[in-house]
């Protein structure tokens, strides 16, 4: 099982959020799809706002939260992450970044494992290749904050590489 998915499942267990047994690969109901899409769009919007501000730590937090949300959909289904390499190179235009992010989020209306996995892998890829940050460390810090039920978001600036 993917290490980050394991953390999301741990969080769901801690807050008694229902999720399918790992490996079941259940389909999401229409209302679950609507809720998942709303959450993905909300987290995607936070990434876009952070990009507009130019705050790298905030962009990283947004990407990690978006990845967490995509993994939550997989946990709800009882699925594992499907391996999908990301083919994206920064071409110097923010709009190309926005397009790929929005397209990947939009594709999740399918409810398919692959589409949620693609959002997760894109977030990890952008964290390392766009903002030059430690995605694993940031993911763990966000997870630890959720587990401690802290209302204050962790400062991810220490996850940014110089």
Image (cartoon, helix red, strand yellow):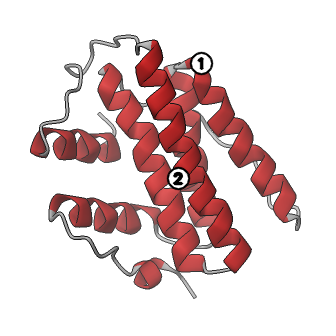
Under circle 1, the secondary element is helix
Is residue 101 at all visible to an observer of this figure?
Answer: yes
Q: Check the picture and name the quadrant holding the N terminus.
A: top left
Residue 7 versus residue 97 in the image, above or below: above
Sequence-first disc among 1 and 2? 2
Q: Please give the residue where the numbered disc 2 appears in the rendered image.
A: 43
Residue 156 versus residue 11 in the image, above or below: below
Residue drawn at (39%, 67%) of the image: 138
Q: Position of residue 36 (x, y in %)?
A: 46, 33
Q: Position of residue 33 (x, y in %)?
A: 48, 23
Asked whether, in this view, residue 27 is left or right of residue 9, the answer is: right
Asked whether, in this view, residue 133 is left or right of residue 71, the answer is: right
Q: Position of residue 151 (x, y in %)?
A: 26, 71
Residue drawn at (84%, 54%) of the image: 96
Q: Please state which of residues 18 and 25 is positioned toward the viewer in this rendering.
A: 18
Label 2 crowd (10 A; few <14 / some 14-19 / many >=20): many
Residue 108 versus residue 93 in the image, above or below: above
Residue drawn at (43%, 19%) of the image: 31
Q: Position of residue 78 (x, y in %)?
A: 29, 21
Quadrant of residue 137 in the image? Answer: bottom left
Number of labelled discs?
2
Q: Please give the residue where the numbered disc 1 appears in the rendered image.
A: 110
Label 1 crowd (10 A; few <14 / some 14-19 / many >=20): few
Residue drawn at (52%, 20%) of the image: 111
Under circle 2, the secondary element is helix
Is residue 82 at all visible to an observer of this figure?
Answer: no
């Amino acid at each position: 099982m993917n290490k980050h998915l394991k953390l999301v499942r741990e969080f769901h267990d801690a807050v008694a959020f229902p999720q399918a047994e790992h490996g079941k690969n259940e389909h999401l109901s229409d209302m679950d799809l609507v809720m998942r899409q709303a959450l993905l769009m909300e987290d995607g919007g936070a990434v876009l706002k952070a990009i507009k501000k130019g705050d790298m730590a905030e962009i990283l937090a947004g990407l990690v939260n978006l990845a967490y949300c995509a993994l939550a959909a997989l946990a709800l289904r009882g699925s594992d992450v499907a391996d999908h390499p990301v083919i994206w190179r920064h071409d110097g235009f923010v709009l190309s970044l926005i397009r790929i992010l929005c397209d990947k989020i939009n594709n999740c209306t399918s409810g398919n494992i692959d589409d949620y996995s693609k959002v997760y892998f894109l977030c990890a890829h952008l964290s390392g290749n766009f903002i030059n940050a430690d995605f694993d460390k940031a993911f763990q810090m966000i997870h630890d904050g959720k587990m401690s039920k802290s209302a204050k978001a962790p400062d991810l600036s220490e996850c940014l590489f110089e």
